[in-house]
Image (cartoon, rainbow, N blue to C red):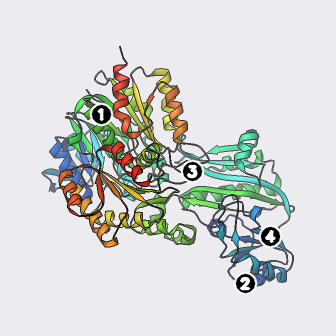
Amino acid sequence: MSILVDEKTRVVVLGITGGEGTFHAQRMLEYGTKVVAGMTPGKGGTRHLGVPVYNTVAEAVRDQAATAAAIFVPPFAAADAIMESADAGVRLVVCITEGIPTFDMMKVKTFLRGKPVNMIGPNTPGIISPGKCKIGIMPGHIHTPGTIGIISRSGTLTYEAVQQVSKQGYGQSTAIGIGGDPIVGMKYIELLKLFRDDAGTDAVILIGEIGGTAEDEAAAYIKAEFPKPVVGFIAGQTAPPGRRMGHAGAIIAGGKGTAQEKMEALSAAGVHVAASPAEIGSTLKKALSGRR
Amino acid sequence: MKIHEFQAKQILAKYGVRVPRGAVAEQPAAAKDIAERFGPRVVLKAQIHAGGRGKGGGIKVVTTPGEAEVLAKRMIGMTLVTPQTGPEGKVVKRLLVEEALDIGRELYLGIVIDRAREAAVLMASTEGGVEIEKVAAEKPELIFKEYVHPGTGLLAFQARKLAFALGLDGDTQKQAVKFILGLYKAFEGSDASLAEINPLLVTTQGDVLALDAKMNFDDNALGRHPDIQAMRDLDEESPLEVEASKYNLNYIKLDGNVGCMVNGAGLAMATMDIIKYSGGMPANFLDVGGGVTEEAVTNAFKILVSDTDVRAALINIFGGIVRCDMIANGVVKAAKALGTKIPIVMRLEGTNVDLGKKILEDSGLPFSMATGMKDAAEKVVAFVR
């Protein structure tokens, strides 16, 4: 099984006619994702990659019953694209775009509150339920269907974890990139709740990094309410304080948000924490073989 | 992005936030002129990004324009060492020369983004002129907070709450409310990530001004603020980091001797971590980005080996969509152009990985191939032992 996306998900790609949108929508279609529409203002009525293009998301929802939106729109227009998608009634918005200003995302979160929509990202490779649906830019071929859920703030580090996990003989139920920015949509706790209730997920891998308190909050939730095994890895154990390490959200500010503190919080909550990034797969194997 | 105090005060002035009268002096004679305009008592303030300037002799009060010129001659060009600059200090290129004001009370006002609350938060404290982290640790009840609703911005009643909490009344309280509202407008209007007024001065006459001002900006938003982008001071950044930013590469110089180049920030941090885990010290953080091109790889490699501290390098590329043969070509091109002699460990995963490996093996250059991150880290650390 899976969470959030499966073979029934119908995707409208915002920015489909742009370079990034075209490249990745093509690969999503090749993977088997039901890309049912594209949206580029001014290109409505045309077809692109064999898919109808609309001027607005509302039309894509009306005509093609789109249930999810993939955002491949430049940074200063992306917040508006997210809000248009939510307003049009899609249930899931996946925003790939990196570089959206923090103030824009604070306004997006305020706009989304109370609406029946989930957001993944921004600054994310996306979400994939292997064999069923891929919304994003991750390489489909390294994923295999299975029972391990993955929640990560990273892109290529997630692929590294997926590959290690696959090598150990475990497939993935759903892998989600929650994004590298300081203000994002769904974070660890909301996704852990979905994985907890997903009969097809036996264990979860949580990949975090320096900056913010999302992993610490997740640790508290895991300790109190998450019964399945969790494996954790936190990147940035060697990061210097006060510097932004690539991701907008990866910064140790005022001494807070260090990797060590997150690893301690997760360990104390019963998470199997891998100290080395090369041991994520082997730590999962140990955690699962420890179960009776 | 960081800016100088004088630039932050320029931005604040634009938003109607009151700052002391003054101007920037890059020559001693200019300091004298400014002192004649706004003095005779003026403060000479060294303009460097780092804090703690007073402790290093970077902030001085003088009583005559003549004294201003003499002191400016000593301060301009000095290497200012503060607890925040590191022992090598920073060369002072300019001074902010301001009217010296009569200090009544020193308060604190700051705005940051609270990630957990997903909102900007205003913090005000009666304990100005000291480090706010100390106040937060020892007397948190003296810090007053107001969270800003992203849909409305800071509301007037919130500014009043803070002003009254600071124990202000009468005209001073009204000035403080205007100041706080203006500060927030400046913060949101310029897409700042931090605005700190420490101290917020109440003069003996009851006027409210920013005695110091510090503003940092959201890098993601700079594209819509060309005027703030123009305030960037390249002298405050390390040369290799400046070079890397030209190619949109994320590069941070560290203390070690094992260089690394990776696609993706999380994987790049994890690569630094595993180098240390294997007994080495990373020389840098370098993320060539998820959508890496051959040109980016070539430029990244050149920056990586320009650091003379680097004695061996690890290139870790998980190319999901990115083609490994393209990566290999970029690295070989750069290595040949530079005549690189240091050992380079390559760990490639993804599309066309075998073709990529072949290109590296056939190049005749000192590449070692690794399988997996552990093997890669151990190999590169072995080279520097």
Return the residue at label 3: A241
Amino acid at dot 3: Pro
Is residue A230 depicted above or below B81 in this figure?
A: above
- Residue A50: % across, % down: 12, 51
Give the chain of mark 1: A
Res. A69 image quadrant: top left
Between label 1 and label 2, give the one nearer the viewer. 1
Give the chain of mark 4: B
Image check: A89 left or right of B254? left
- Residue B328: % across, % down: 25, 60
Image check: B51 left or right of A206? right
Return the residue at label 2: B30
Discs 1 and 2 lie in a common subunit:
no
Res. B261 image quadrant: bottom left
Amino acid at dot 1: Val
Between label 2 and label 4, give the one nearer the viewer. 4
Q: Answer yes or no: do the residues labelled 4 and 3 have beta carbons within 8 Å?
A: no
Return the residue at label 1: A165
Give the chain of mark 2: B
Mark 4 vs mark 1, CA separation in Å: 61 Å
Q: Answer yes or no: do the residues labelled 2 and 4 have beta carbons within 8 Å?
A: no
Return the residue at label 4: B60
Report if residue B183 is visible in the image: yes
Discs 3 and 1 lie in a common subunit:
yes
Mark 3 vs mark 2, CA separation in Å: 38 Å
- Residue B185: % across, % down: 60, 58
Q: Secondary structure at mark 3?
A: loop
Along the line of sight, the residue nearer the viewer: A261 or A151 = A261
